[in-house]
Amino acid sequence: MTPADLRRLFENVAPDLDAFAQPWSLIGSGALILLGAPFEAAADLDVVTGVDGAARLAAAWAGWLEPGEPKAPDGPFRSEDFARYVTPWGPVEVMGGLKVRGRELDLRGPLPPAEEQLRILRLFGRPKDLAKAAVLEGWLSAG
């Protein structure tokens, strides 16, 4: 999805996130694009919430649930409740109770600042996350 697609997706799902998923935060490429970082596309919008928030979203978004097998844990992190939704505006992945290296991910606000996103990318530590971290570091240092 392009930056314009992501903004439209976020504008359309944010009211539901506020209503059903509090507290919630965005991470990943979509969050970086919404922050204005120099990324040109993202596959989806990644939402982290608690297990209760994920369950409330599941009830509200049942018609958008992407059928199929649950996503296998990837690297050092696991979600207690993971779901992928195909909304009319684009795909959203919801991670309820996300734990990284056995500890719940502590996030600050709906769209954590770039420095916090950088910390998260480094914490995940996969090659694709570290590549994004390098781009983000360059953008932050350029001011």
Image: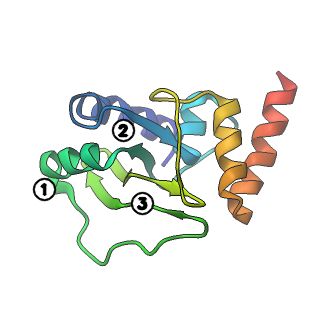
Q: Decide if residue 40 is on the left or right side of residue 73.
A: right
Mark 2 is surrounded, within 10 Å at the Cα level, by few (under 14), some (14 to 19) or many (20 or more) other residues, namely: many
Instruction: Mark 1 vs mark 3: give the one in front.
Output: 3
Mark 1 is surrounded, within 10 Å at the Cα level, by few (under 14), some (14 to 19) or many (20 or more) other residues, namely: few
Q: Which mark is residue 9?
A: 2
Q: How far across and down, in percent of the image, does residue 2 sit?
A: 52, 44
Q: How far across and down, in percent of the image, does residue 141 sit?
A: 86, 28
- Labels 1 and 3: the sequence-earlier one: 1
Q: Residue at x 73, y 50 (%)?
A: 122
Marks 1 and 3, how far apart at CA:
21 Å
Q: Amino acid at mark 2?
A: Leu
Q: Are marks 1 and 3 in contact (CB under 8 Å)?
A: no
Kindly tell me whether residue 39 is visible in this rendering: no
The residue where tag 3 is placed is: 79
The residue where tag 1 is placed is: 63
Q: Decide if residue 1 is on the left or right side of residue 66.
A: right
- Secondary element type, mark 2: helix
